[in-house]
Amino acid sequence: MRNNLAIYGGFAGTETTLSQRNTAANPSILSGNIGNASLSSDNTYNIVTSPGTNNTSRIDGFTITGANANGGGTFDTDRGGGIHIGNDASPIIANCIISGNNAQFGGGIYVKRYTSPTIINCLISGNTAIYDGGGIANETNGFYTLINSTIAGNSKRGIMHYGSTAVLKNSIVWGNQYEIYGYATVSNSIIQGGAYNSAGNLNTDPLFINPLAPGLNTGGNYGLQAATIALNAGLNDAYTNAGGVLSTLDIAGNPRLFGDQVDMGAFEAQNNTTNDNCIDAIALVCGQPISGNTFGATPSGMSTLCGPYASADARDVWYSFVADGSLSYTITVSSSANEWDGVLFLYSGDCNNLVYQECADAAVPFYGGTESITPDILAAGTYYIRTLGFFEASTYTIELTCEPADCPLLGLDIGNACDDGNPNTINDQVSSNCECEGHLPNDDCSGAIALECGQPISGDTFDATASGVDTECGYNSPYGYDVWYSFVADGTSNYTVLVSTTSPNWDGVLFLYSGDCNNLLSEACSDNTVNGGAETITLTTPAAGTYYVRTYDYFGSEAYTIELTCVCPLLGLNVGSPCDDGNPATINDTVNANCECLGVPVNDHCDGAIALECGLPVSGNTVGASSSGLDSYCGFTASSALDVWYSFVADGTLSYTVSVVATASDWDGVIFLYSGDCNNLVYQACTDASVLSTIWVYPPLPLSSLANLSIALFSISILEIPAMTETLLRFTTRLPLPANA
């Protein structure tokens, strides 16, 4: 520091005057953590020094942290870690946070002889001293003035005076390892220990929001709770007469004077917000603006994300209104204050179960802008509004505007969501002619619905629009309100597309394309019948790839059914047709989409479990098996879990061993054992130890208990069973077996 030099921090870079800065929102940090950031041993001894400067020297609006004055005493390298004030100096230190500094003497500030600095609106916390004066150490014949400052959480001792003195006004010294040693003149302050119970001083807990135990740190929250005794307990003149340019904000960026009288300490309590919680929401009335502020608000803990940004401030307040189910409502929050950048949230439900509806955070410019929400016509009921300043607390005006709906018969505005009564449409909304209109999801080629072999689909073209693709198929329809479907050919099968209806008003037209939606190539079309008829197109072994189907009613719009039939030439059967896969152990054999005849094992489900007999191996496989959906974790989790089931009955006296022996190189078996029944399986054990998987069941299972098992290719035996018993079992594979295993 130097004479005739004032150093200010706390700017965002857009300010044009000093009064526009906010040191809390825009911290300017002077750190002594140089060199290796993970070590404090190489930190700088002193961060700020003031060698013999007068009161034209000022440091204002900085966070000063990370000093380690652990030197040997030469050039004061062992004292004044945060700030070292030299002999005959009288600088001004204002609006600073001095925390997380260490020294042998004066971890936060060290005041040398014949000095008279002034410390205003500062937080001195979390500093340490090896010998004394964790917050402030004042050398013989030293002197300083402390105004509206907080000294808390420091070790060793908050303030130490060595044959020196000081004046403390409107300040708080509380929660340090020890408080003050030595003489001081104190007024309108809170001093722990009761040594200064006069002149408006108090020995009462100031109720910090989140104080930390004394020690080296930069944390905690030394703001004041709403019930603090420091509220309005300071003297205004002590602050306003401190000299120099005084900040209008406290150390947290809130107004320094909130109410008629200044508070004690560096923080001004902001506790007059009555709608800080949802249950205290202020009711809005149509057309009646309300002025408010968020100075005393606290965060509700709800998300502040609206669009791509989330506020770090989050001090929110609440309003409510009652919708009647027919009016259109607009909520607006605005401010002429330069520091206000409002965010607005709307919820339904109640305060215990709020349901997010929408939010607004779009105003440009950010500061002093207006945010508004005009939701779709709301159902009758109570709605809640939450607003906050994105960057900081400020004043604002909020207003609820209520207007009749654009479409009174619907009770909705144009563009509102609605229900057109057609379950096949999506994105239904009120049109400009006050009709509720939806859109079919397959109204465009890009939304084509996939057809599956042998699975008819019902549809309609009532809400379809014309795609503009050619409608010429022998005749040219003047309407062409078309919809789209697709299917994937495998290059070996034959495909037939059929569109039909039971309505006598349907005159269907059918088109088939290859290519893609951006480059459709016509393959065929059909318009061979009149009202009530069916149209078909057949492709014989078309090339593998995706094909698109387009259909419409020649004369307008109607309902229909569309179906894709797939014929496998080698089998001479349709996909989905019954067949015989030649495996007597399977059931429900059908032709799959790959033109393979494949059944499922008879024991694919628990209720089809095959009964095991003692000492009689059973061969099986999991080809065609499906997953039961049960947990497949047994040390590892099976990727397929295609399981089959077996059972046996235990007699309550014997021990049982279940073994699975692989006869295929790609088998990696897993065995699960359950009791209970198929509707209420109770897990007992599992094994996944080797190609040969074994479960020993001991002690004996109770009579009629149930165990279950799933398998690929294996032989299974229950050993050492001298008499017939009963139980169930399950096996699964880690990897699916090939179809020809």
Image (cartoon, rainbow, N blue to C red):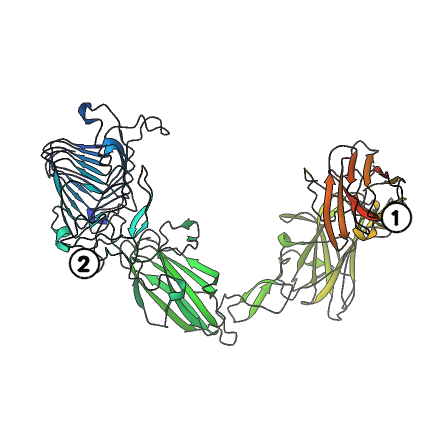
Residue at 27% x, 28% y is 44
Q: Amino acid at mark 2?
A: Gln
- In the picture, the quarter occupied by the N terminus is top left
For marks 2 and 1 on the same chain, the one whose residue lies earlier in the sequence: 2
Choose between 160 and 740: the one closer to the eye.
160
Residue 26 location, x and y as percent?
29, 44
Location of mark 2 (residue): 261
Choose between 276 and 361: the one closer to the eye.
276
Q: Quadrant of residue 643?
A: top right
How many numbered discs? 2
Location of mark 1 (residue): 572
Report if residue 540 is visible in the image.
no
Q: Residue furthest front?
A: 653
| Label 1: which secondary element | loop
Give me the C-alpha separation between circle 2 and circle 1: 96 Å
- Mark linked to residue 25: none
Residue at 42% x, 69% y is 329
- In the picture, the quarter occupied by the C terminus is top right
711 lies left or right of 69: right
Q: Amino acid at mark 1?
A: Gly
400 lies left or right of 452: left
| Label 2: which secondary element | loop
